[in-house]
Amino acid sequence: MSARPPRTDFGTDDPAKLTALIGSAVACLLIGLFLTGGGARLLAAVPLVAFAVLSTAAYSRARASSLTKRRLWDALLDDLALTGTETALDVGCGRGLVLAGLAQRLPHGRAIGVDRWRTREQSGNHPAATEATMRLLGVDGRTEVRTGDARTLPLEDASVDVATAGLILDHLDGADRRLAVDELLRVLRPGGRLVAVDHRRLDDVLDQLRVAGCAPVRAWRQRGGPPYPAFHVIVATTPPVTTGQAH
Ligand SMILES: C[S@@+](CC[C@H](N)C(=O)[O-])C[C@H]1O[C@@H](n2cnc3c(N)ncnc32)[C@H](O)[C@@H]1O
């Protein structure tokens, strides 16, 4: 009998939005049932249709927070064809979905997760929760979970081979996003790889990477499973001498 994979909980993105969707769906259902009970069957169709739409949206959002996102990152990390000895950084690691994916591909390397642990952006966001997940997956020996800010990363210059940023850059405003990208370029080694996934197309990030000499810089849009917003992916290779080192 094959062993079941451990049950991991990577949290829910933007939990307030999911709660609002579920609350609105339940309210529509109750109104629909109330109107049906009162004999106003035709009128009841309106809240009942709204219930169907809202509950589909809630399901799709919850699914994208876990399954859809996990599949996307699995494909992106596989594409990196890591040798298994690299040092990787996952900035804004949250509950550790991407961090775990990196650590699983680095049996002789290291994966460092850095976060400010904002529970508004991911449910149950706490370093202890992420560390517990890494233990559950058996990758705690090669992961490090640190508290820090993407704008001032607690890492040395040119100290990582790969950096990932999942759904964090589009949470930062223009100036902060610029600082965060500068920091990623500073900590990446020459020829290092950066993978960023967001729900918005971030042209400013693409421009910044190209001006810094990254090549190639690839960007594409990936469906998130409607009505969940699509994912926008950026994959870039840092230049032989990074801007951070040139300073
Ligand atoms: C939507 S969650 C995504 C978490 C994880 N990357 C994933 O894809 O599942 C965004 C994460 O970015 C973190 N974050 C936001 N601003 C940050 C900053 N300035 N520095 C470090 N982490 C930050 C939040 O605490 C949160 O954990």
Image (cartoon, rainbow, N blue to C red):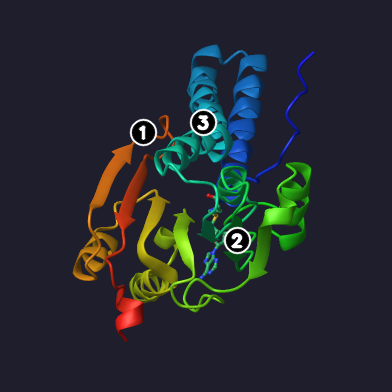
Q: Is residue 184 in view from this perspective?
A: no
Instruction: Give the vertical position of 186 relative to 12 (above or below).
Output: below
Tell whether 92 sits left or right of 199.
right
Instruction: Give the label, 2 or 1, closer to the camera.
Output: 2
Task: Answer yes or no: is residue 122 visible.
Answer: yes
- Residue 194 in picture, x, y percent from top left: 38, 57
How far is mark 1 from mark 3, CA to CA?
12 Å
What is the crowding at mark 3: few (fewer than 14 residues within 10 Å), some, or many (at least 20)?
many
- Name the image quarter holding the C terminus: bottom left
Q: Secondary structure at mark 1?
A: loop
Question: Mark 1 sits on what residue?
Answer: 223
Q: Nearer the viewer, mark 1 or mark 3?
A: 1
- Asked if the beta carbon under badge 2 is closer than 8 A to the nearest atom of ligand 1, the reply is no
Q: What's under tag 1, amino acid-wise? A: Arg
At 52% from the left edge and 58% from the top edge, which residue is drawn? 88
| Vertical side of 120 occupied by 54: above or below | above
Quarter of the picture holding the N terminus: top right
Measuring from the top left, give residue 110's x and y in whole percent.
60, 57
Disc with the residue nearer the chain's start (2 vs 1): 2
**What residue would you read off at disc 2?**
113
* Three-letter amino acid code of the residue under disc 2: Gly
| Location of residue 8 in the rendering, given as x and y in whole percent from the top left corner | 72, 39
Which amino acid does the dot numbered 3 rest on? Answer: Ser
* Residue 130 x %, y %: 71, 54
Instruction: Quickly name the residue at label 3.
Output: 60
Mark found first going from the N terminus, 1 or 3: 3
Beta carbon of the mark 3 residue lies under 8 A of ligand 1: no
Give me the residue at 48% from left, 65% from top: 160
Gap in angstroms between the C-alphas marked 2 and 3: 27 Å
Within 10 Å of the Cα at label 1, are there few (<14), some (14-19), or many (20+) other Cα atoms? few
Classify residue 81 as left or right of residue 190.
Answer: right
